[in-house]
């Protein structure tokens, strides 16, 4: 906590500091992420048995750190300083729809789930550790919608963490089979291992595809299952994209810290 979390949490302007333990406040935020409870239902006495603290104060710090980029800084620092713990022999790309109960930014009706959803594109390493995600899009859009902008956002975070994307093999299912995406990946000097989509018809272009490497795609399914262990991510109640994205950065960080055993 002292090494990887606290240095990246803003503490106030012009020297202002709280008398409360920010580490405990951060743990309460993680508790809410893990359980999915309402902010007012947080077990404050469990962390502050001798002090009077309100749930509004915990939410104040969550909102503050959410808006000022603290959670993203935590995740970038973890990646940057622990690259040797990642398996970048292959990376996995996939989209995931999350039901939304309150509407908001990037929410739309998705017929397959018969509900309003947000769709996010995720990138994980070859062991199922999530690395980055794109900007959410509303549920009526398929995975290739705004794929160039989505990929730019995903790779920009890797760049911030000083992780080189050139030369990476990228696994993706048939939903990502498009000439546009293959061309983008080629420009980025990444090797696409994308399953052919039969609905696109036969093409004369010879495409690289390794069936054995494609079998590793189950790792991103495993990664999404780990994310589902955080109940606040199972259903989207946040109306703002920035909040939804930062909750994922928090989940990525907690899962990676478990791997580091700290």
Image (cartoon, rainbow, N blue to C red):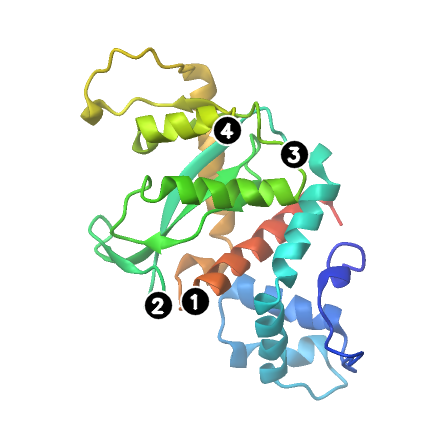
Are the residues at dot 3 and dot 4 in contact (C-beta closer than 8 Å)?
A: no
State how far apart marks 4 and 2 are (Cα): 33 Å
Residue at position x 49%, y 66% from top? 36
Residue 87, visible in the rendered structure? yes
Secondary structure at numbered mark 2: loop
For label 4, count other residues whose C-alpha is less than 10 Å away and answer few (under 14), some (14-19) or many (20+): some
State how far apart marks 1 and 4 are (Cα): 30 Å
Decide which of tag 3 and tag 4 comes sooner along the chain: 3
State how far apart marks 3 and 4 are (Cα): 20 Å
The percent coordinates of residue 197 (x first, y second) are 26, 25
State the residue position of label 4: 188
State the residue position of label 2: 104
State the residue position of label 3: 86
Decide which of tag 1 and tag 2 comes sooner along the chain: 2
Are the residues at dot 1 and dot 4 in contact (C-beta closer than 8 Å)?
A: no
Residue at position x 52%, y 30% from top? 91
Q: Nearer the viewer, residue 86 or 36?
A: 86
Of circles 3 and 1, the one toward us is: 1
Label disc, if present, on residue 240 of the rendered structure: 1
């Amino acid at each position: 906590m002292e090494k990887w979390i606290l240095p990246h949490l803003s503490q106030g302007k012009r020297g202002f500091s709280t008398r409360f333990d920010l580490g405990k406040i951060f743990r309460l935020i993680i508790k809410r992420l893990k359980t999915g409870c309402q902010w007012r239902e947080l077990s404050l006495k469990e962390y502050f048995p001798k002090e009077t603290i309100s749930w509004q104060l915990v939410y104040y710090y969550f909102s503050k750190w959410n808006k000022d980029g603290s959670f993203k800084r935590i995740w970038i620092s973890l990646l940057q300083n622990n690259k040797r713990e990642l398996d970048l022999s292959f990376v996995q790309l996939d989209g995931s729809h999350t039901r939304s109960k309150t509407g908001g930014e990037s929410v739309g009706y998705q017929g397959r789930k018969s509900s309003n959803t947000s769709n996010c594109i995720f990138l994980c390493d070859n062991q199922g550790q999530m690395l980055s995600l794109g900007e959410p899009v509303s549920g009526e859009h398929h995975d290739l919608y705004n794929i160039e902008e989505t990929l730019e956002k995903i790779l920009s975070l890797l760049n911030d963490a000083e992780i080189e994307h050139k030369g990476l093999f990228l696994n993706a299912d048939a939903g990502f089979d498009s000439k546009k995406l293959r061309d983008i990946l080629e420009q980025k000097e990444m090797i696409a291992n994308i399953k052919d989509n039969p609905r696109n018809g036969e093409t004369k272009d010879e495409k690289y595809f390794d069936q054995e490497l494609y079998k590793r795609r189950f790792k991103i399914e495993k990664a999404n299952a780990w994310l589902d262990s955080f109940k606040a991510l199972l259903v989207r109640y946040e109306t703002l994209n920035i909040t939804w994205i930062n909750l994922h950065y928090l989940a990525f960080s907690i899962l990676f810290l478990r791997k580091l055993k700290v």
